[in-house]
Image (tube, rainbow, N blue to C red):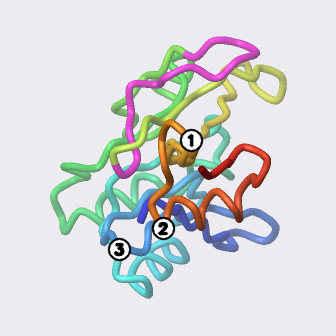
């Protein structure tokens, strides 16, 4: 299964962090943890091990919980094994930042990071801050639809998929 689950975790008075998980994995990723306690509670409730933190920008209401989260989620190893990603322009402004992403303005491009083996894309969106970044994880590639024709007869499952998906593309001999 390659479906991502995103849980909004209320933080501070009016902010959210986001936990990204997958039903078939014990790994978890967090976006913009302004404080550690609610994020740790969400990770623990779901039985997840923190593998990475993504920051959209350096303001404290987005990164204020990173230091505590790294210390507590890594079992006292000081964040060992957990990456912290942000735009390269936020160097020394995001606590514990280990990944300095050079994202282009106006289009998503590979960041060099992965979530659950899927490439993580990034786009530089200056405005709120000069180093604001948007993150995206493209959907897993769809399996090709079966193509049935007189030259390529359909198997029973392929014929069922053809008839449900796009009957006009399927013809049977």
Secondary element at tag 2: helix
Label 1 Cα crowd, 10 Å radius (few <14 / some 14-19 / many 20+): few
What distance separates the C-alpha of mark 3 from that of mark 2?
A: 40 Å
Instruction: Inspect the magenta stretch and tell me whether residue 113 lies in it.
Output: yes
What distance separates the C-alpha of mark 3 from that of mark 1?
A: 50 Å
Residue at position x 75%, y 52% from top? 166
> Of the numbered discs in the image, which one, if any, rests on residue 156?
2
Q: Residue 73: percent from the left, percent from the top? A: 30, 67
Secondary element at tag 3: loop
Q: Residue 117: percent from the left, percent from the top? A: 33, 45
In the rendered image, which residue does mark 3 sit on?
48
Disc 3 versus disc 2: nearer the observer: 2
Label 2 Cα crowd, 10 Å radius (few <14 / some 14-19 / many 20+): few
Q: Residue 12: percent from the left, percent from the top? A: 71, 69
In the rendered image, which residue does mark 1 sit on?
150
Taking the image as drawn, is residue 133 in sight? yes
**Bounds of the magenta span?**
103-116
Quadrant hosting residue 74: bottom left
Q: Is residue 76 left or right of residue 3?
A: left
């Amino acid at each position: 299964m390659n479906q991502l689950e995103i849980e909004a975790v209320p933080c501070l008075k009016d902010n959210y962090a986001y936990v990204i998980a997958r039903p078939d994995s014990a790994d978890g990723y967090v976006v913009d943890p302004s404080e550690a306690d609610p994020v740790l509670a969400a990770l623990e409730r779901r039985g997840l091990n923190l593998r990475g933190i993504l920051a959209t920008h350096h303001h404290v209401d987005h990164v204020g919980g990173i230091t505590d989260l790294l210390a507590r989620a890594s079992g006292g190893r000081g964040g060992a094994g957990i990456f912290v990603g942000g735009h390269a322009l936020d160097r020394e402004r995001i606590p514990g930042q280990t990944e300095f992403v050079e994202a282009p303005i106006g289009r998503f491009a590979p960041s060099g990071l992965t979530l659950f083996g899927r490439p993580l894309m990034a786009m530089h969106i200056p405005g709120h801050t000069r180093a604001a970044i948007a993150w995206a994880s493209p959907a897993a590639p769809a399996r090709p639809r079966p193509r049935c024709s007189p030259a390529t007869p359909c198997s029973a499952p392929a014929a069922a998929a053809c008839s449900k998906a796009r009957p006009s593309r399927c013809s049977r001999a």
